[in-house]
Amino acid sequence: MCADLPADPSLPYAEVGAVLEAAGRIGLTCHVNPDPDALGSLLAMHHGLAQLGCSVVSSFPRPFRLSPGLAWLPGTAELVPPDDFPERVDVLMTFDAADLDRLHEFRHHADLAGTVVVVDHHRTNTGFGAHHLIDPHAASSGNVVAALLETMHVELTPPIATCLYAALAADTGRFSFRADAATFAYAARLVAAGADGALVAARIWGAAPLAALRLLGEVLVRMEHDCELSFVSSYVTNLDLQAHGVDRADIEDFVETLRRVRDAEVACLFRELVDGRVKASLRGRGAVDLGGIAAALGGGGHHDAAGFDAESFETAREQVRAALDPRLRAED
């Protein structure tokens, strides 16, 4: 394994590579509403398997649409709608999904597949599937994909490097955490292979619809700050999205703006889902294990970035406050 590749070398990459190379039909999928890590990991693997001459088909759960910030990534044109995904594949690979529920309708395909390979970096992964490439110490799921592709002697082409760079940049908060020497060495390797870091940043995070920025203004106005808990929060409803004509993908980064509040160790954006339930997106500065909080509430994530679903705004707020209360007090 390459020394500048930050992934656990003890994982069974060779075993999984042999399973893939022997398979007749390979299916790739990731969690619902894919972020750059989930989508970038999937697309990089799709490119790699195609390079090896494997039969591969890729998709992700409904709603089957990508924001402009992700739709440009190399390989998205190869994605097929869920209805066109074969009911049974010899191998189903999942990316960045900590449990089967995150696969939505593709859980059915997992049940029917000859075998399931799980690629992930969430410590809350439930261990579903038969073959596990799960490295909770990896900066992104893309890191694990990179290690697997290297083991399979796949050439690191510009499209693959671009997808992996997007995965890495996203799950390091654009290199604002997990910003160690190994991460930058890996990023440098991807750039040397053809990834354009400036282009990735500009396409994914550098532009937003005017309507989304206007909605962000409202979200900031309604922001609440709990000094005792060092906690800041705000919310977005379905009516907000309809009134502003904003897509759900365009509000994914709103919580990062809340995270910038200097006097708050934890930030949370409560977002109403299509079915009326509420998603709580948590971000922190290191003082609180948000992944542990989210896991206890039925969700998951990482130490400084996690989330969970609740039945209502009120329930979600109460759950977060109750979880924070014994763990965090603002400094005088």
Image (cartoon, rainbow, N blue to C red):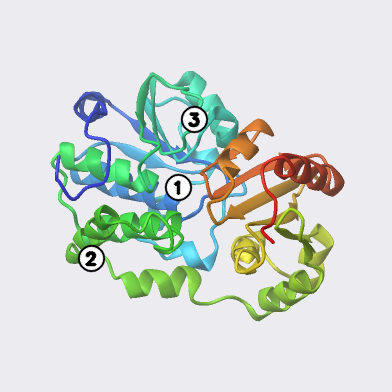
Please tell me which residue lies in front, 233 or 265: 265
Q: In which quarter of the image is the N terminus?
A: top left
Q: How crowded is mark 2: few (under 14 residues within 10 Å), some or many (20 or more)?
A: some
Which residue is under mark 1?
38
Please tell me which residue lies in front, 328 or 279: 328
Name which residue type carries label 2: Val
Q: In which quarter of the image is the C terminus?
A: bottom right
Which residue is under mark 3?
125
Horizontal relation, residue 260 to residue 75: left or right: right
Marks 3 and 1 sit apart, C-alpha to C-alpha, by 14 Å
Label 3: which secondary element: loop
Counting from the top left corner in percent of width and height, residue 277 is at 79, 44
Q: Which residue does the image show at 70% across and 77% down from the upper left?
A: 211
Q: Which residue does the image show at 14% across and 45% down from the upper left?
A: 2
Counting from the top left corner in percent of width and height, residue 38 is at 45, 47
Name which residue type carries label 3: Asn
Marks 2 and 1 sit apart, C-alpha to C-alpha, by 20 Å
Q: Which residue does the image show at 54% across and 32% down from the upper left?
A: 106
Please tell me which residue lies in front, 80 or 108: 108
Label 1: which secondary element: helix
Q: Exactly how many numbered labels are in the figure?
A: 3
Name which residue type carries label 1: Ala
Which residue is under mark 2?
191
Horizontal relation, residue 269 to residue 90: left or right: right
- The single residue placed furthest to the front in the displayed view is 332
